[in-house]
Image: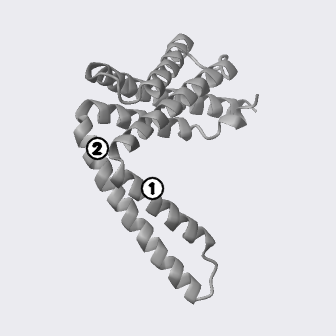
């Protein structure tokens, strides 16, 4: 596979930053604080949806196409209401999505490691990180909020470490791409 497939190395960096933020979220906040934050976030999304709905009516008056804004406004209002009315379920859904995300990122790490194994150093570290990330994703997916406080803190620490390794991997991929481009 050509290195052109990995030109978006920054995608790995962004995912590393998301993992670090998720880890900090687990380490610094309790479930009650997160539910309260979700409630207020729901209010913010609901207000955004209402503003978009007003924009939709404005577009209709001006005979402009408003289909995308209409869809965005309805989706924002629905999501906002769900977050306000069901903060616990929203938190569970959030953790399930994080579990899916972590599993996909772990698989992506293993694919990158396999495809670029000739150009990357520290292969065993990246292999272990990819496998642990998949394990983390599966644990979070199947036990989204029933994970005990201690395990949640361990997952938070692991997420931060994973995020740092992911950012490191992104710079290794970037370096490999630059080296490959210079050789051509």
Q: In the depicted view, which residue is nearer to us: 85 or 46?
A: 85
Residue 49, position as x, y percentages in the image: 44, 67
Q: Are marks 1 and 2 in contact (CB under 8 Å)?
A: no
Q: Residues within 10 Å of mark 1 (few under 14, many from 20)?
A: some
Q: In the depicted view, which residue is nearer to us: 72 or 116?
A: 72
Say which label, 1 or 2, has the lower sequence index.
Answer: 2
- Label 2 residue SS: helix
Q: Say which quadrant the N terminus sits in.
A: top right
Q: Say which quadrant the C terminus sits in.
A: top right
156 versus 29 height, above or below? above
Residue 98, position as x, y percentages in the image: 46, 34
Residue under numbered circle 1: 79
- Label 1 residue SS: helix
Q: CA distance from mark 1 to mark 2?
A: 15 Å
174 versus 143 height, above or below? below
Residue 72, position as x, y percentages in the image: 53, 64
Q: Residues within 10 Å of mark 2 (few under 14, many from 20)?
A: some
Residue drawn 66% across the image and 18% down it: 114
Query: Could you tell whether 124 is left or right of 30 in the image?
Result: right
Q: How is the image coloured?
A: one colour
The part of the image, by quadrant, that contains residue 151 is: top left
Q: Could you tell me if residue 2 is visible in this image?
A: yes
Residue 24, position as x, y percentages in the image: 30, 34
45 versus 135 height, above or below? below
Residue under numbered circle 2: 35
């Amino acid at each position: 596979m050509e290195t052109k497939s990995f030109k978006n190395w920054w995608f790995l960096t962004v995912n590393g930053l998301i993992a670090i933020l998720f880890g900090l979220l687990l380490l610094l906040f309790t479930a009650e604080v997160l539910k309260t934050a979700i409630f207020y976030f729901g209010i913010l999304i609901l207000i955004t949806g209402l503003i978009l709905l007003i924009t939709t009516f404005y577009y209709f008056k001006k005979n402009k196409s408003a289909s995308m804004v209409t869809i965005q406004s309805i989706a924002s209002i629905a999501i906002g209401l769900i977050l306000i009315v069901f903060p616990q379920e929203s938190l569970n859904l959030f953790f399930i999505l994080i579990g899916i995300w972590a599993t996909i990122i772990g698989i992506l790490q293993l694919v990158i490691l396999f495809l670029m194994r000739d150009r990357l150093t520290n292969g065993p570290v990246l292999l272990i990180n990819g496998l642990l990330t998949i394990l983390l994703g599966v644990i979070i997916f199947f036990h989204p909020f029933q994970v005990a406080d201690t395990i949640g803190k361990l997952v938070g620490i692991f997420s931060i470490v994973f995020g740092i390794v992911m950012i490191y991997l992104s710079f290794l991929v970037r370096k490999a791409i630059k080296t490959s481009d210079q050789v051509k």
